[in-house]
Amino acid sequence: MSVLGIIYAIPSLGMFALLIPLVGLGSKPAIIALVVYSQLILVRYVISGFQSIEPSIIEVIWHKYFQIR
């Protein structure tokens, strides 16, 4: 999560400055930056959601669906 926080802390103009040498000018760096920022928020909430599940529920799910019979 700390890596995601560091990437999310980079301002959008800084992200464009990093992307321009890689992909050039135009709409491509803007689209990449928007996708990266939206995915970071999504991953942060998914991780916090998984961390809020009780370990006993995870164990039941693991035994029911992933155990080789």
Image (spheres, helix red, strand yellow):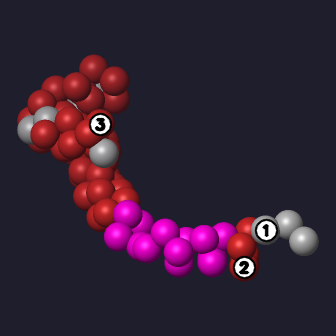
The mark found on residue 64 in the picture is: 2
In magenta segment, residue 18: no
Badge 2 vs badge 3, beta-carbon distance below 8 Å: no
Q: Height in image: 29 above or below 22? A: below
Could you give the CA–CA distance between mark 1 and mark 2, rounded to whole angstroms?
7 Å
Residue that label 1 marks: 67
User: Outermost residue, top direction?
Assistant: 21
CB within 8 Å, label 1 to label 2: yes
Where is residue 63 shown, x and y percent of the image?
71, 73
The secondary structure making up most of the magenta span is helix
At label 2, which amino acid type do we have? Lys
Find the distance from the CA under tag 2 to the CA under tag 3. Answer: 33 Å
Regarding residue 19, the answer to whether it shows in the image is yes
Question: Which segment did they paint magenta?
Answer: 49-62
Location of residue 8 (image quadrant): top left
Q: Is residue 13 left or right of residue 59?
A: left
Check the image and report above or below for 45 versus 10: below
Residue that mark 3 sits on: 3
Assign the C terminus to one quadrant of the image: bottom right
Residue 42 appearing in the image: no
The N terminus - image quarter: top left
Which numbered disc flags the more N-terminal residue, 3 or 1? 3
- Corner quadrant of residue 22: top left
Q: Dividing the picture into quarters, in which one does residue 33 lie?
A: top left
Residue at figure coordinates x 34%, y 29% from the top left: 23
Residue for point 27% across, 20% down: 21
Rendering coords of residue 56 (x, y %): 53, 75
Residue at disc 2, secondary structure:
helix
